[in-house]
Amino acid sequence: MNHPHEKDINELGGVLLEAGVNLLSSGASCARIRLTMKRLAASFKYTAHISIAPKSVSLTLNNEADALVFNGMRSITAQGVNFKTISGISRLSWDVLEKQYSIQQVRDELDRLMALPHYPRLVILFFVSLAGSGFCFSFGGKLPEMVIAFGATCCGLFVRQEAVKHRFNPFICVYIGSLVASLFAGAFIKAGLNINFEHAFATSVLFLIPGVPLINCFTDLIDGNTLNGIVRGINAVMFALAIALGLLTTMFIYNLK
Amino acid sequence: MDWITILAKAFWCGWGAVGFGILFNVPLRTLFAIWICGALGGFLKFNLLLLGAGVVSASFAGALAIGISSIPTAHFRHAPPMVFAIPSVIPLIPGVFAYRTMLGLIKLTGAIGPDYQAIISDTVNNGAKTLFVIMSLAMGVAVPMHLMRKESVKNIRLR
């Protein structure tokens, strides 16, 4: 790898940018994106200079003589939080260093990682609903409230997944999810069941909380990636507002106080 | 709240963490570790609440425990610490306080009655709790990594 051809450098730059944008859209913090891309570049003996915008990653590669050899930028494709990608790419960056992969091998491994499947939809629905009833219990709910939280989470998540499939705006997807989940929980309260209203209602929408942007916001701010941190924070607040709006709509429909 | 309740709450916090892990599509090999981290955080939080700590400091302690334990776990399970830490702290997010804050804010848009002062105090109290708990959760997870002052968990010597 001492004197790679120009084609190889372009290929390497493309692979690095692809790894970067995939990390960004899967919910990695800026420090991690930078670290992984630099580690990958260093194992091919290049120095990487990276700039991360909220929706794109730019990269220049310098060779050992500090001469510019590659310059490129790529913007993210829409994709949800995916920790399998983050963990896979991070592992790949170590394997490249230890096992001396060629550029083509890195490309193949990246393609394989990106094609890895999600958990089956029923599994996701079941476990997230279980998490919903878990939240309900930890906030002091009893069995009836937990069952309602389970059902509400299941319905809300299902509708939200459908909305995501139809490529609605992400905030609208969250709003619809929140609306459906709270409509489900509210129906039992409206039917006059003797349950703790607050526990069932407040925990039915918790599966929508924007945990990843919220925590990445702070991680980025601490690292000094202030702009990205602020962008993620505002995103998280917008999602929270969408959840609140869904709850409000339900309360208006059922005339709950 | 007695010991059985605390253990049950910790158990369910673990399931909450696993649910979010599956939603975030974590690798299968990390799920058990995520359950442990989530249960540990919940156990510490509810224990401290029982001992009379405030909700903010109890949540911070829980998140800090999760943040610290995610570092050796990352080492042994070969995934970045955030993969363990983010799903695990989500059960500690104060959903009920956030909900009460929202309700209070809505009530504040209504007419000024005799209980308006009480609503203001309640809303500000709940809002401050929500804000500070969420901040302390994020800090508790982010700070352990930075205290290590290493570029990557792979460089941290555990022995």
Image: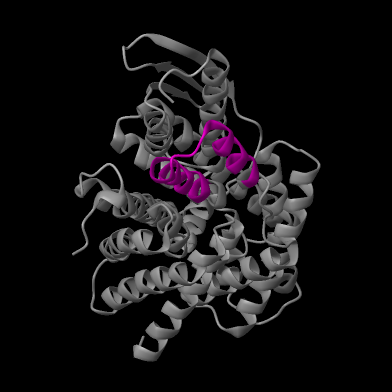
Can residue B111 be seen from the camera position used here? no
Query: Within the image, what quadrant is residue B65 found in?
Result: bottom left
Query: Within the image, what quadrant is residue B61 found in?
Result: bottom left
Can residue B57 be seen from the camera position used here? yes
Q: Check the image and report above or below for A213 versus A151.
A: above
Q: Is residue A236 left or right of residue B129?
A: right
Specify the quadrant that holds the N terminus of chain A.
top left
Q: Check the image and report above or below for A41 versus A236.
A: above
Indicate the position of residue A138 as horizontal and vertical percent values. 47, 74
Q: Check the image and report above or below for B149 versus A232.
A: below
Q: Is residue A194 left or right of residue B143?
A: right
Taking the magenta stretch, the answer to whether it contains residue A92 is: yes
Q: What residue is drawn where x is 34% and y is 89%?
A: B3
User: How has the structure been colored for display?
Assistant: one colour
Query: Within the image, what quadrant is residue A8 found in?
Result: top right
Taking the magenta stretch, the answer to whether it contains residue B37 is: no
Indicate the position of residue A158 as horizontal and vertical percent values. 75, 58
Q: Is residue A15 left or right of residue B37?
A: right
Residue lying at the far front of the rendered structure: A2
Indicate the position of residue B137 as horizontal and vertical percent values. 35, 55
| Predominant SS along the magenta part | helix
Q: Which residues are magenta?
A: A86-112
Q: What residue is drawn where x is 52% and y is 73%?
A: B15
Q: What residue is drawn where x is 32% and y is 17%?
A: A64
Indicate the position of residue A94 as horizontal and vertical percent values. 41, 45
- Residue placed most toward the observer, A110 or A51: A110
